[in-house]
Image (cartoon, grey):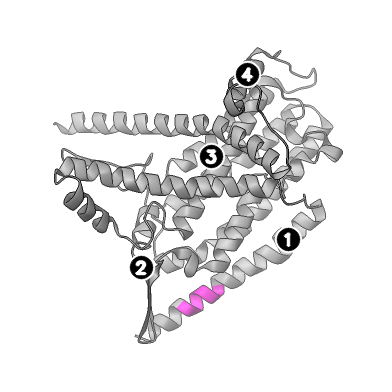
Amino acid sequence: MSSMGLDLFEITINGVKLLLIFLMMVQAVPILVWLERRGSAFIQNRFGPNRVGPLGLVQLLADAVKFLSKEDFAPRTAVKPLFYAAPVFALIPATLAFCAIPMSVPLNLGGYIFRIQGYDMNVGIVFILGISSMAAYTILMAGWGSGNKFSLMGAMRASAQIISYELALGLSIVGVIMMYGTFNLTEMIAQQQGALQFSAFGYTVSSSFLPNWGIFYQPLGAILFFSAAFAESNRLPFDLAEGEAELVAGFHTEYGGFKMLMFFIGEYGHMMLASGLMITFFLGGYSIPGVTVEDVRQFVAQNISNSDSTISILTTLIHFLSFNIKFGLFLWIFIWVRWTLPRFRYDQLMDLGWKTMLPWALANTIATAFIIYFTSMAF
C-alpha cells in the first residue's frame, strides 16, 4: 500500500473508531439510567420502573419518545445561539477525552495494529484534563443563554465548583505521573501488570496475591482523585448546581425535551470518563490482576488456538472484558453514592475543596517526590 493509501486508511480507521466510541457512550446512557432507577429503588425499598416491558426495560424507549415529542421551547429573554449550542457542546468534552483512554491491548491483524482507543497520545493526561475542563464553558453557556437568574446562579455555582476541584484532581495525579515517569496512558498500564513488586533501599517487597496497581503506591492520590471526580461530574454529594430547593433545577432549568436529555448524556459521559481514568491510573487499566499480557497470550496459544490472528483477537477481547468489568463497577459506585450520601452545603463544598483536598493533594505530591528521590539515591 502506498504512503497516501496508508494515510487515507488510517484516517478512515480513526474516524470509525471515534464514531464507535461516541455511539458506545451514548448507548450506555440509557442502560445507566435504567440501572440508576432500579438501583435507587432497591436502595430505598421501592419497585422502580416495572410497567413498560420486563423489569421496566422498555421504559427507556417510552422516555425517548416523550423527549423527542416535547415542544421545542425557548425563553423570550434567552440568548438563542448560546441557548441552543450549550446542549450540543455538553456532549463533546467527555467524548473527546474518553477517546484517549486505552480500553484493551492493540489488535494485530495482518501486520496492521488497531489500537483500542480513539487516539494514542504521548501527553494523554494533559489532553484529557484540558478537554474535560471545557465542560465549565458549556455550563456557563447554558446559564447565560437561558436569560434566567436561577439558571445563571446555578451555572456560576457549577463552574466555580468544577474549577475549584480541578486543582485537587490535577494535583492528585501528579504523584502518579512522577511514579510512572510518563504522560502516556498505555505505558502507565504496562507498568501495572503482573504481581506487586517494589524495590527500595536494597530491599524488594513482593506479593503473589496483590496486583502491581497504582492504588497500592498512591492510596491517598486515589482517594483524592475519586472524590474530586464526583465534583467534576456534578454528582451527589457535589450536585450543588442542582439544589432543587434553592435553584429550581440549576443551569438547565429552562431546558426540556431532547435538549435536557443531551445535558444528562454529558453528565453520564463525565461519569464514564472519571471511571476510565480511575481504572487507568490506579487499577491497572485493562490489565488482569497479577497477570501480564504475555501470560494471556501464552494461555490462549496453549489452550485455544495457535493462529496469530486468533491469539491477537482473543487477547484483545479478554482485556477489553477486564476493562469493562472494572468500568461497570465504578459506574455502579457513582450510582450507589448518589443514593446514599446527603448533599453538601455550598460553603462546605468550597471548604472541602480548598482547605482539605487541595492541601492533602499537595502534601501527597511532595511526599511522593521525596520518596522517589531517596529511593533512587539509595541505589
At x 27%, y 33%, the residue is 10
Task: Residue under label 4, please give it.
Answer: 62
Q: Quadrant of residue 205?
A: bottom left
**Percent from the top left, x then y, of residue 92?**
53, 34
Q: Quadrant of residue 320?
A: top left
Contact between marks 1 and 4 (CB within 8 A): the answer is no
Q: Secondary structure at mark 1?
A: helix
* Residues at marks 1 and 3, CA–CA distance in whole angstroms: 25 Å
**Percent from the top left, x then y, of residue 152?**
78, 35
Query: Horizontally, is 42 left or right of 320 in the view?
Result: right
Contact between marks 2 and 4 (CB within 8 A): the answer is no
Q: Mark 3 is on which residue type?
A: Ala
Task: Residue under label 1, please give it.
Answer: 352
Q: Secondary structure at mark 4?
A: helix
Task: Residue under label 2, please give it.
Answer: 195
Q: Secondary structure at mark 3?
A: helix
Q: Quadrant of residue 351?
A: bottom right
Magenta stretch holds residue 368: yes
Q: Nearer the viewer, mark 4 or mark 3?
A: 4
Going from N to C along the chain, the mark reached first, 2 or 1, is: 2
Q: Is residue 146 above or below residue 188?
A: above
At x 33%, y 34%, the residue is 14
Contact between marks 2 and 1 (CB within 8 A): the answer is no
Magenta stretch: helix, strand or loop mostly: helix
Residue 17, numbered circle:
none
Query: Horizontally, is 160 left or right of 55 in the view?
Result: right
Task: Residue under label 3, please give it.
Answer: 94
**Percent from the top left, x then y, of residue 47?**
70, 34
From the image, which quarter does the N terminus lie in? top left
Q: Mark 4 is on which residue type?
A: Ala
